[in-house]
Each structure stands twice: as structure tokens, then as C-alpha cells.
């Protein structure tokens, strides 16, 4: 691959420059301004959630978004601060910083940079398929737990008093115990804005509700002097562009930083891909997951260099871009330019923004993050996967955001092992009792005529160390419970793409057991890796080349010919229902 192709492969934005059409700009301009109108107040609110000064939220909306526009593969995705990522950042850094704001800022830069490096490395080595690692129910449960934790954490700010940080239930208990400290002007501002956000979202969803709420809140503080009545405000927001900062870091901080960065990478990327794939499917194009992991890494590094914090795909802002008619990533660049102008010329009004307004925006966003409909759907369709979602959600709520990542990962691994260790299985029976040539798969336990003496079994999964015993038990059960003692046992290995040493030895043991019962063991439709392991383990030689067939047709023909049931080559029809 030449240099030009490599650059085009890793920098898709260059292709956009060459192919961009002038008539798209009007749509992208309007979409970009709409994104900025929503992203600005949400960015400030998420900065508060992550434990940062308000301006850091604006920083995190500018260069990271531009970086994704250059390196990402989605046309609509907006990369901005994200609720789940911010919650993990706060959970990672608060115990390390111990209330020291400068140390918190330094640790945040390192955490963001390390997260970016992990994403860069993952994208370059093809690790983007990790987006499929957290199943949808587990990711839904995790994000629901995040949403409830955010809501609980903002209740104190909404009511006008401080609540010590802790898990969901601890925080809710703290809020309830301090209800007598409620500050009426603060709760009046917060609740009225929260109701306004809900109404705007339902009645006029295309209107930038967070911006309207922020403007009205600032106006209320200015005209009614709410700041002098005890309503807390954001305070001065420095103007100008950020400059890179060299952080101080202790060696002892590296381990928790790496753990936090790995959790952020997993959750933020999986969440981002859910959003990116959804809008790509809607607009008729595909996503390159490895390229997007690389792009997310570049976005995080851009955030670290501009005193921002980790970012992810922002579903609410992406929805704004799409609904406003954004055609390309130029809309994101327009939004970044608009927010840069705010940083340069309009930071003074932001000082009057009440923290209760930010709490209202965060709680409103968290309500959008909480997905009750999917939980209901999981309950109806699959009780086990509903249980996985609930365990992931409760893990976040009880153990905390960061341990909740570990709970989600463990659940994902257990889910994979459970599915792989108990794969689907089927046997072949006659489709027509009068026609011994018409074979079709049926579910185990279903009634159906069989060819006396022939048992054909399909195991829909790789044969590996963790399911080899299950495989052996199932075969023994089928043989012993067969109505007529089998003379031949044929294993359809088409779905057994992988075979390890344990699986190979299990097949040899099975062959020997069947041989002791005077039953021929044959294999059909084996894949190349499967056969290669059989040969290396010596099992192929034990089975015998005469008992290895390319098709079910050949295997069944060999059995029927041996039994002299037919005098011609049968036409065997194999029908697989996947």
C-alpha cells in the first residue's frame, strides 16, 4: 500500500475535502449552529459532573470534535463530553486528587491522554470489534445505572445543598436526610427549568432546549438578583483558547489511571459505536469500527492537549446534527468554530449561569439516557438477558461507576462462556417417512421418522475446553436414548469452526467409546482449521480417512450402501435452519 493510500485509509477527512459539494454547506452550517446551541450548555454541565471547571466542558467540545471529523468514518457522529465517561472520570480521579484542584486537573490530562493512546493502539491492531463485546442488554443496564447515579448525584444541587458523594442508595439517603436544608429559590429555578426541558423535548424536540434553559436561567439571575438570594452560580469563565499543560504525575498513580482508562475506553467506545451505527444505518452507509476507535483516540489526545477531558459519541448532539439536516462532518467543524467564538467573546454571561440549571440539564440528559423500553423488551423476549441488564445496573448503583465497569465485563465474559458452552444442537431425521433420501434437521425432542441405525448430529459451535464435556454427555445421551441402536454416528462439523486439543481428545475418546459399542464414528463437512487440528492430534488417523466425508450426502450414502438399503446413489437434502 503506497503512502497516499495509507493516509487516505487513516485520515478519511481528506477524502471529504476532495468530494465535498458546495450545495451541502447550507445544511451543514445550520446543523453546526444547532449542535453548538445544544453542546455548549451540556458541555458545561458535564464538566460539573466530571469535577472540572465549566470552561473545560467547552474545551472538550472543540478540538476533539474536529479530530473526529478528520479521522472518523461517521458522517453525523458528534464527539463531545459524555455522561458515562464523565462519571467514570470522576470515580477514578476523586480518590486520587483528594480535593486538590490542580492535582485533579493534572490527573485528568494524563487519564485522557492514556485513554487516547489505548484507543489509538486498539484501532491500529484491529481491536475495534470490542464494540461487540458488551451485549446490548449489559450495555443498557450499565448506562441505566449511570443515569440513575447521575440523577441521584444532582438532586442535592437541584435542592440547594451539598450531599457527600457515594453510591446511588447512599446519595439518595443523604438527600432525604437533608430535605430540611432545601433552598427554595434554588429549587424553584432548578425545577422550573427541568420542567421546561421536558416540555420542549416533547413538544418541540428540534429546539435547543438546553440553550434556552441556560439563557433563561442567566436572565433570571441578572434581572432578579438571584445570586444575592443564595442561588449558586458558575462564576467567572476564562476567555481565550486553551494552551497545552504539562501535568505532574506520581508513579503510584499509574495503576489506577490505567484501570480507569481501560474502563473508559471500553464503555465510551461501545456506547459511541451504538450511536454511530444507528445513524449510519438510518442514512445508508457503513462504519469502520477500527477507524473509529483510532479516531476516538485522536479525539481524546486532542482533549488532553487542550485541557479538556475524555469524550465519546454524543447521542443527543448527533441526533441534533441529523435532524437539522447535517450532511457531513463539516457540521461538527462549524459547531467547533461557533463555540470557539463563544470562548473568545461571550464568556461573561456564562458567569451568571446557576448550578441548579446545570443540574436540571444533567438530570434531563440522564432521563434520556435511561432506557426503560429496552428493559421491558428484554423481559418479554429473554429473561436471562433481562437479568444481565438488571445485574449490570445494580452493580453500578451499589458498587459505584468504576466497579460497575468490572461487573459489566464479567457479565459479558460469563454470557459468552454460557452461550459458547451450551451451543444449539440438532439431529437429522427423514422429511418424508416414505423417502429415505429426504433428510432434514429437527430440534432435539421433536418427533420425526429416522433411518434405523443412523444418527446424524450437528453441534452448532466450536469444540473447545469449556464445552467438550458437555458435548460428550450430549452424544452419550443421544446414543443411549435412540429408539434403535445406532450402527453409525455421523457428526456434522460444519458449524465447528474451531477445535482445540481438549476438543480433539474428546473426539478420540468418543470414537473409542462408540467403537466399543460397535458403532462407526464418521465426520462430515469439517472445516480446514478443524481438520488441521484433527491431523495434528492424530485423531484423523484414528477415525480413518474412509470415515471423513465432504458432505452429508456422501456420509449417508456410505451408510445406506453398507446396509444395502438402496441400489443407487441417494439424493440427500441437507437443510440447515440457523
Image: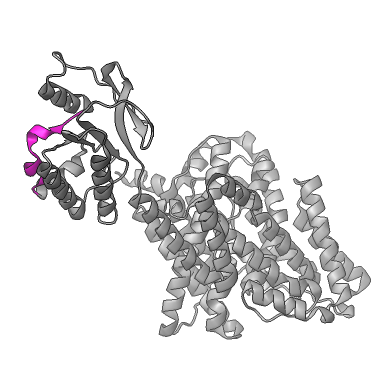
Quick one: 75 or 424, which is closer to the camera?
A: 424
Name which residue lies at 72% across and 72% down: 237
In the rendered image of this protein, does residue 475 appear above or below residue 389?
A: above
Q: Is residue 312 visible?
A: no
Quadrant assignment, res 511: top left
Percent of width and height locating residue 558: 13, 25
558 lies above or below 130:
above
- Return the x and y of residue 510 as percentages of the image width and height: 17, 47
In the figure, is residue 276 to the left or right of 6?
right
Residue 240 appears at what percent x and percent y? 66, 69
- Locate residue 360 relative to residue 265 in the image: left or right: right
The quadrant of the picture occupied by the C terminus is: top left
> At 61% from the left edge and 59% from the top edge, which residue is drawn?
144
Q: Coloring scheme of the render?
A: one colour
- Residue ranking furthest to the front: 483
- Picture residue at 51% right of the left edge, 37% below the top: 285
Report if residue 402 is visible in the image.
yes
Q: Position of residue 168 (x, y in %)?
A: 64, 72
Which residues, given as a range, are shown in magenta? 538-551
The quadrant of the picture occupied by the N terminus is top left
Tell me: residue 542, above or below residue 144: above
Q: Nearer the viewer, residue 444 or 337?
A: 444
- Does the magenta-highlighted stretch encompass residue 167? no
Q: Nearer the viewer, residue 155 or 328?
A: 155
Residue drawn at 15 percent across, 52 percent down: 505
State the image quarter where residue 241 is shown.
bottom right
Residue 375 vs residue 492: left or right? Answer: right
Amino acid at each position: 500500500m503506497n503512502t497516499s493510500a495509507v493516509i487516505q485509509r487513516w485520515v478519511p477527512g481528506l477524502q471529504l475535502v476532495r468530494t465535498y459539494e458546495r450545495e451541502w454547506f447550507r445544511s451543514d452550517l445550520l446543523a453546526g449552529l444547532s449542535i453548538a446551541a445544544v453542546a455548549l450548555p451540556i458541555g458545561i454541565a458535564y464538566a460539573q459532573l466530571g469535577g472540572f471547571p465549566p470552561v473545560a466542558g467547552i474545551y472538550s467540545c472543540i478540538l476533539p470534535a474536529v479530530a473526529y471529523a478528520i479521522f472518523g468514518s461517521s458522517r453525523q457522529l458528534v464527539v463531545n463530553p459524555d455522561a458515562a465517561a464523565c462519571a467514570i472520570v470522576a470515580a477514578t480521579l476523586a480518590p486520587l486528587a483528594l480535593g486538590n484542584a490542580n492535582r485533579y486537573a493534572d490527573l485528568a490530562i494524563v487519564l485522557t491522554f492514556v485513554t487516547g493512546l489505548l484507543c489509538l493502539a486498539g484501532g491500529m491492531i484491529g481491536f475495534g470489534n470490542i464494540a461487540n463485546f458488551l451485549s446490548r442488554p449489559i450495555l443498557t443496564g450499565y448506562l441505566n445505572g449511570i443515569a440513575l447515579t447521575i440523577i441521584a448525584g444532582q438532586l442535592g444541587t437541584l435542592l440547594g445543598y451539598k450531599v457527600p458523594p457515594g453510591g446511588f442508595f447512599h446519595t439518595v439517603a443523604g438527600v432525604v436526610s437533608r430535605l430540611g436544608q432545601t433552598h427554595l429559590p434554588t429549587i424553584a429555578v432548578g425545577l422550573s427549568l427541568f420542567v421546561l426541558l421536558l416540555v420542549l423535548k416533547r413538544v418541540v424536540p428540534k429546539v435547543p432546549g438546553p440553550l434556552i434553559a441556560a439563557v433563561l436561567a442567566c436572565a433570571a439571575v441578572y434581572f432578579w438578583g438571584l445570586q444575592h438570594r443564595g442561588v449558586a452560580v458558575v462564576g467567572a469563565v476564562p476567555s481565550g483558547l486553551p494552551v497545552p499543560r504539562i501535568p505532574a504525575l506520581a508513579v503510584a498513580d499509574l495503576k489506577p489511571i490505567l484501570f480507569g482508562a481501560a474502563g473508559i475506553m471500553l464503555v465510551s467506545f461501545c456506547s459511541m459505536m451504538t450511536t454511530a451505527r444507528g445513524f449510519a444505518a438510518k442514512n445508508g452507509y457503513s462504519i469502520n469500527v477500527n477507524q473509529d476507535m483510532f479516531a476516538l483516540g485522536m479525539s481524546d489526545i486532542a482533549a488532553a492537549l487542550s485541557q479538556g477531558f475524555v469524550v465519546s459519541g454524543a447521542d443527543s448532539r448527533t441526533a441534533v446534527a441529523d435532524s437539522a439536516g447535517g450532511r457531513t462532518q463539516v457540521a461538527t467543524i462549524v459547531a467547533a468554530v461557533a463555540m470557539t467564538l463563544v470562548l473568545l467573546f461571550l464568556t461573561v454571561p456564562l458567569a451568571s449561569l446557576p448550578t441548579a440549571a446545570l443540574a436540571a440539564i444533567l438530570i434531563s440528559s440522564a432521563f434520556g439516557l435511561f432506557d426503560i423500553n429496552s428493559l421491558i423488551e428484554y423481559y418479554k423476549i429473554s429473561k436471562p438477558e433481562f437479568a444481565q441488564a438488571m445485574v449490570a445496573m445494580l452493580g453500578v448503583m451499589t458498587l459505584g461507576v468504576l466497579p460497575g465497569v468490572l461487573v459489566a465485563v464479567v457479565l459479558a465474559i460469563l454470557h459468552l462462556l454460557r452461550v459458547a458452552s451450551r451451543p444449539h444442537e440438532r439431529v437429522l431425521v427423514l422429511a418424508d417417512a416414505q423417502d429415505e433420501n429426504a433428510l432434514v434437521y429437527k430440534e432435539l425432542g421433536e418427533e420425526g421418522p429416522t433411518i434405523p441405525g443412523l444418527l446424524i448430529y450437528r453441534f452448532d459451535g466450536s469444540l473447545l475446553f469449556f464445552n467438550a464435556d458437555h458435548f460428550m454427555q450430549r452424544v452419550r445421551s443421544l446414543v443411549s436414548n435412540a429408539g434403535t441402536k445406532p450402527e453409525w454416528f455421523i457428526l456434522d462439523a460444519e458449524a465447528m469452526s474451531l477445535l482445540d486439543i481438549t476438543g480433539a481428545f474428546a473426539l478420540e475418546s468418543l470414537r473409542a467409546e462408540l467403537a466399543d459399542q460397535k458403532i462407526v464414528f464418521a465426520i462430515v463437512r469439517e472445516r480446514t482449521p478443524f481438520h488441521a487440528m484433527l491431523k495434528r492430534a492424530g485423531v484423523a488417523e484414528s477415525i480413518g480417512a474412509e470415515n471423513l466425508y465432504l458432505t452429508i450426502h456422501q456420509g449417508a450414502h456410505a451408510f445406506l450402501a453398507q446396509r444395502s438399503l438402496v441400489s443407487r446413489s441417494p439424493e440427500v437434502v441437507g437443510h440447515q435452519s440457523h
